[in-house]
Image (tube, rainbow, N blue to C red):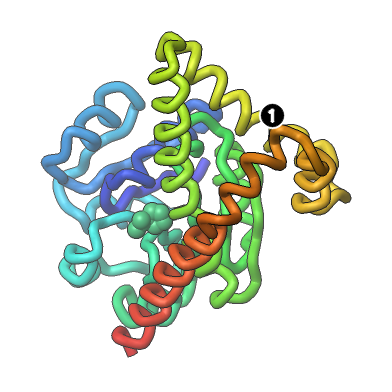
Amino acid sequence: MKAIGVLGVGALTEKVVRGLRRGGRRAPIYLIPHNSHQAASLARDFDCEILESNQAVVEAAQVLLLGVRPENLKSLALSVDLGPQHWLVSFMAGVSHRDLLRLFGTDRTIRSMLSYAAETNDATVVLNPSNAKVEKLLSSLGTLLALEHESHFELATVASCVNGWFYFLLHDLQRWVADKGLEPEQSRALILGSLSDCVEYAKANQHRPFAEIGRSITTAETFSSLGLEMIGLHQSNAIWGAACDIVLDALIERHLRAD
Ligand SMILES: O=C(O)[C@@H]1CCC=N1
């Protein structure tokens, strides 16, 4: 059983640890000393151990999960010395393999991106590149998607941001329904059901393009086509594309700045 070291308990690595434990992983998990309440709660409730130094964690583990805040990356890298036995799995958005090599002196690096759903073992777990050992470790967190090109991996980071934006869309729609008089739990169930029905149906019809399913629903004179026309008039889809563009540009800019 390979011991896991968590270099920084951030929003994503915390969910990963919870998901690993929920998924049945019993190997030791070590955390770097950190004053965060997340680290304390992982130690208390998820059988993790906070060690006395960053290097102690590196020495105790073979797989290292990296998830510090960007401003703390350099100082963390300076505080540890990785060996040939380590695999460094980075959840840092926009930090390239080349950056990791420069910072940590190892090319045994895997980049991963996922969402909060890792906590409930239901995430899309994107890896770059594919790696059998790391895939085995993270497989309990959800569905694996290995991408061979790092430039493609940045699109997974954008998709992870889209995941965050969906919550605001859900919020706005739930509030609209609640304002019309439905109880909050009922409006939540209604709007969540609307989205999850769409996801489930699309998953069960892999061969059908999304737009084709949508068009088959919003045929002429339907109520759904009436609303779709309004969405089109406001160019709402173009706004989502623009949001993705700005994130991708920032990720590419981050790479260029690091050069
Ligand atoms: O927003 C962020 O920076 C991270 C990366 C992808 C999702 N969350």
Residue at 42%, 79% (x, y): give it.
252
Residue at image x 15%, y 45%?
Answer: 34
Which three-letter amino acid code belongs to the residue tagged 1? Asp
Q: Nearer the viewer, residue 229 or 52?
A: 229
Quadrant containing ligand 1: bottom left
Relative to residue 179, is residue 19 depicted above or below? Answer: below
45 or 13, nearer to the observer: 13
Horizontally, residue 203 falls left or right of residue 238, namely right
Task: Tell me the residue at 82%/42% (across/down).
Answer: 219
Residue farthest to the right, as pictured: 207
Q: Residue furthest left?
A: 35
Question: Residue 158, position in %: x, y?
Answer: 48, 62
Q: Position of residue 21 (x, y in %)?
A: 46, 29
Residue highlighted by disc 1? 197
Q: Residue at x 29, y 53 (%)?
A: 7
Let me know if residue 106 appears in the view: no
Q: Is residue 121 left or right of residue 106?
A: right
- Using the image as rendered, state which of residue 120 and residue 87 is in the foreground: 120
Instruction: Report which quarter residue 257 is drawn in.
Output: bottom left
Picture quadrant of residue 253: bottom left
**Residue 176, how many percent across, how many down?**
43, 27
In this picture, is 247 found above or below 122? Answer: below
Q: Can you say which quadrant of the picture contains the C terminus? A: bottom left
* Labels in figure, total: 1
Q: Is residue 74 left or right of residue 13?
A: left
Query: Can you tell which quarter of the image residue 37 is in?
Result: top left
Residue 220 left/right relative to 123: right
> Mark 1 vs ligand 1: CB under 8 Å?
no
